[in-house]
Amino acid sequence: MFNDVIINMLELIETRITQIRDKALDLINDASNFMKYVSEVAPPSKEPVKFIAADSGFTEITYLGFRIAVINVAMIVNTDGKGRILNRFEALLGVSGDELEKMALDMEAKHALDASRSFQINVVLLDGAIIGRNYVSRFSVPVIAHVKDVKSNRYLQGIVDTEFKNYVSRALQIMEEPLIMHVIMETYRIRNKTSVALMTKPYIVGRVGDRDVYGFYVQYLPATLPIYTEYMGNPSNIQQVISRIVPLSTMPRLGYPAPPLYIVDKMARVNTSLKDMIRLIMEKLGGDA
């Protein structure tokens, strides 16, 4: 009886995989119809990119029923080819869970905004979406946000071209949005024999304050999975800004500005040593009380 159940289950899985394969082949064959929604990014600018890259880490620490939240914002400021690292800490009471994560994202933008007023830069790099953050509408320079984990198909929701939207909707039945764009971009590369960075057509995917946010996919390196990107700034400068980022995106397999965002990710983490120090302070103050 048990063996029959296993056999039936395996047969069902095999049938479903066959169906997925057939649908995927159809989508790949149709991908050439949508290459017009892909454009090549201009060759990287010879002028060094001046940027701020920001990320944050956070934790909650409890002692005798008291709870304190700690947010650590790490930034790399690069204005002369040499990066400097800045850290900003926030200690908060009565904040936890999703609210703490939201506040950490806001603190990234707030401290990056403060730094942008002290250093001459031409772009701000954020890890995670622009939409949903406070402070980002106040930047006077373009903001580029790379979203490694796409949890919602925000790009699909912004597409206004019916034919393209229908194709993406159909493809989403069997594959995730980044893979759909990968299929189209690789089809474009094969047909046009190019190895430059590619991006999909930008669409307005939302607003922050009174400013539009544009969403699109960028494939900085051939064969890598495109990354969903949000942009706030002059829409006519999107390709020019992306071209400035290309030199930062040379790490194989990752396909996004990994060096600065990887460094700030590591620097922003609230490690065990810091947590232990904060707990010791709480214990001392608790003992004095």
Image (tube, helix red, strand yellow):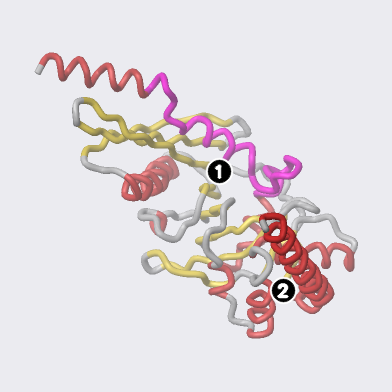
Residue 242 in percent (x, y) is at 65, 55
Please state which of residues 289 and 143 is positioned toward the viewer in this rendering. 289
Up/down of 53 relative to 280, above or below:
below
Q: Residue 269 at x, y = what percent?
A: 46, 32
Expressed as whole percent of the image width and height from the top left, the position of residue 16 reads 73, 68
Position of residue 258 in the picture relative to residue 111 (left or right): right
Q: Residues within 10 Å of mark 2 (few under 14, many from 20)?
A: some
Give the percent coordinates (x, y) of residue 23. 77, 73
Magenta stretch containing residue 50, yes or no?
no
Foreground label between 2 and 1: 2
Query: How far is mark 2 from mark 1, CA to CA?
Result: 28 Å
SS class, disc 1: strand
Q: Residue furthest bottom?
A: 162
115 vs 222, left or right, is left
Q: Which residues are magenta?
A: 245-274
Q: Amino acid at mark 1?
A: Phe
Q: Residue furthest left?
A: 289
The crowding category of the residue bearing disc 1, from other C-alpha atoms within 10 Å (few below 14, some 14 to 19, many at least 20), is many
- Check disc 2 and report the residue beneath it: 37
Which residue in the protein does label 1 denote?
51
Quarter of the image for residue 37 reads bottom right
